[in-house]
Amino acid sequence: MAEVTIVVKEATSGPAIQDIEHYLNQFDGIDRVLVDTADGEVKIEYDEKKISGKRIIGNLQQHDYKSNSVNDC
């Protein structure tokens, strides 16, 4: 199990948070998505055998969310 923390500017409002959680939970290998509404940090626990942190970030960017990794993925 691996974890990546990403800052997503839009992850501070209810609808955006729900959209991000729903979108990420669709991917095979993502086990948990936690969003800190105060600063837009999104913590994602995932199975690195099924999906990579870089792919997670890429998927968010394709979904028009601006994201930056806080830790290496």
Image (cartoon, grey):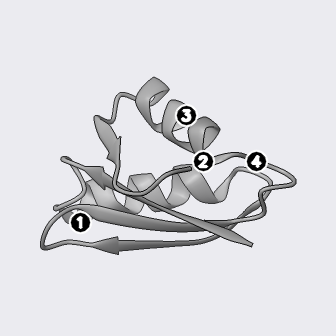
Disc sitting over residue 46 in the figure: none
Establish if 9 lies above or below 29.
above
Q: Secondary structure at mark 3?
A: helix
Disc sitting over residue 53 in the figure: 2
Q: Residue at x 77, y 56 (%)?
A: 48
The quadrant the N terminus occupies is bottom right
> Amino acid type of disc 3?
Asn
> Amino acid type of disc 2?
Gly
> Amino acid type of disc 1?
Gly
Residue lying furthest left: 38
Mark 4 surroundings: few (<14), some (14-19) or many (≥20) residues within 10 A: some
Disc sitting over residue 14 in the figure: 1
Q: Circle 4 sits on which residue?
A: 51
> Amino acid type of disc 4?
Ile
| Mark 4 vs 1, N-terminal side | 1
Q: Circle 3 sits on which residue?
A: 59
| Mark 2 vs 3, N-terminal side | 2
Q: Secondary structure at mark 2?
A: helix
Instruction: Give the image location of residue 57, x and y in percent.
Output: 49, 39
Task: Mark 4 and mark 2 in contact? Answer it, CB < 8 Å.
Answer: no
Q: Residue at x 41, y 53 (%)?
A: 19
